[in-house]
Image (spheres, helix red, strand yellow):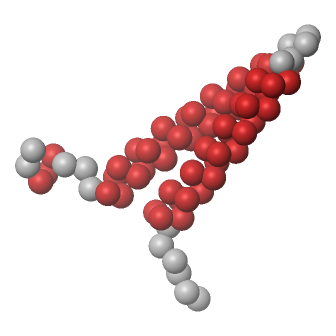
Amino acid sequence: MNASSELNFEEMLRIRLEVMRREHRDLDDAISALEQSARPDQFTLRRLKKQKLGLKDQIVKIEDQLIPDIIA
């Protein structure tokens, strides 16, 4: 691969960030659907919420890497 067709680190982070945001939305939809069911499985609900929280933590870390620190 030549240099012009390779993704730089920031581009890779941005792509990963978008994928993670999509996964986070999908988990949110799954949690909402499960909560609206007649008898939601509490174990599955807890697992999905924990997974969503972990994903949110990873999203924040990547956003912190992409946003430069500005000292006022």
Name the residue: 48% across, 73% down.
68
Compared with residue 12, is residue 22 higher up or lower down, i.e. above or below?
above
Q: Is residue 26 above or below residue 17?
A: above
Residue extending farthest front: 43
Given residues 65 and 71, the one toward you in this image is 65
Quadrant where the C terminus is found in the figure? bottom right
Residue at the outermost top position: 38
Q: Residue at x 55, y 86 (%)?
A: 71
Q: Which residue appears at 61% of the width and 44% of the height?
A: 55
Residue at the bottom extreme of this rendering? 72
In the image: residue 72, left or right of residue 10? right
Task: Using the rendered image of the protein, determine whether residue 32 is visible from the camera's viewpoint.
Answer: no
Q: Position of residue 61 (x, y in %)?
A: 55, 59
Total of numbered circles in the picture?
A: 0
Quadrant of the image containing the N terminus: top left
Residue 17 rendering spot, x and y as whole percentages: 49, 47
Whole-percent x and y of residue 8? Answer: 27, 56
Q: Residue at x 79, y 32 (%)?
A: 46
Query: Does the image show residue 49?
Result: yes
* Side of 66 relative to 36 (left or right): left
- Determine which quarter of the picture holds residue 16: top left
From the top left corner, tell me how far across and down residue 60 is, in percent: 59, 57
For residue 69, side relative to residue 4 (left or right)? right
Indicate left or right for 18 with 24 as reference.
Answer: left
Q: Quadrant of residue 15?
A: top left
Quarter of the image for residue 3 reads: bottom left
Name the outermost residue toward the left: 2
